[in-house]
Amino acid sequence: MKVLFDANALMIPGQFNVDVFSETEALVGSYEPVTLEGVVSELEGISLGKGRDASAAKVGVSLSRRCKVEKNPDNSIPVDDMIVKYADENNCTVMTNDRRLRNKLLEFHIDVIVLRNQKTLEILKG
């Protein structure tokens, strides 16, 4: 099983001190962590700023190295749309804390892993 991590998911450890990789494994069992080049670029951009989000994005860039970084499926569309397209074409579950992306994924019947109460992960069936 592949689990695709978006930028928001990779920032969770820096924001809420939750180990998204071990918690995901506890939730779904053995899995392959993947992300997209566009997600890594997004994190790198956020990490150049200042404040809490920039710090969390730096952690996210570091954590992205634990994922298999896949090529973007279509560079002409926004990163969130790339995530939906990749997950749909590759039968992935997606980990995100982004409400708009979560709702779009569920519309496409793609399972989504979300953070609940800033401490535990939960899977929403798409």
Image (cartoon, helix red, strand yellow):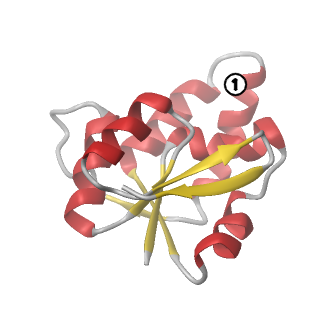
Front residue of this view, candidates 117 and 72: 117
**Residue located at (57% from left, 39% from top):** 97
Residue 78 lies in what quarter of the image? top left
> Would residue 85 be seen by someone viewing this image from the given angle?
yes
**Residue located at (84% from left, 46% from top):** 17
User: In the rendered image of this protein, does residue 67 appear above or below residue 73?
Assistant: below
**Residue located at (63% from left, 29% from top):** 47
On the image, numbered disc 1 is attached to which residue?
53
Q: Residues within 10 Å of mark 1 (few under 14, many from 20)?
A: some
**Residue located at (55% from left, 58% from top):** 123
For numbered disc 1, what is the local secondary structure?
helix
In the displayed structure image, the side of residue 28 where residue 84 appears, left or right: left
Quadrant in which the N terminus is drawn: bottom left
> Would residue 60 be seen by someone viewing this image from the given angle?
no
In the displayed structure image, the side of residue 105 where residue 58 appears, left or right: right
Residue 110: percent from left, percent from top? 33, 56
Q: Amino acid at mark 1?
A: Asp
In the displayed structure image, the side of residue 111 where residue 89 appears, left or right: left
Residue 102: percent from left, percent from top? 43, 40
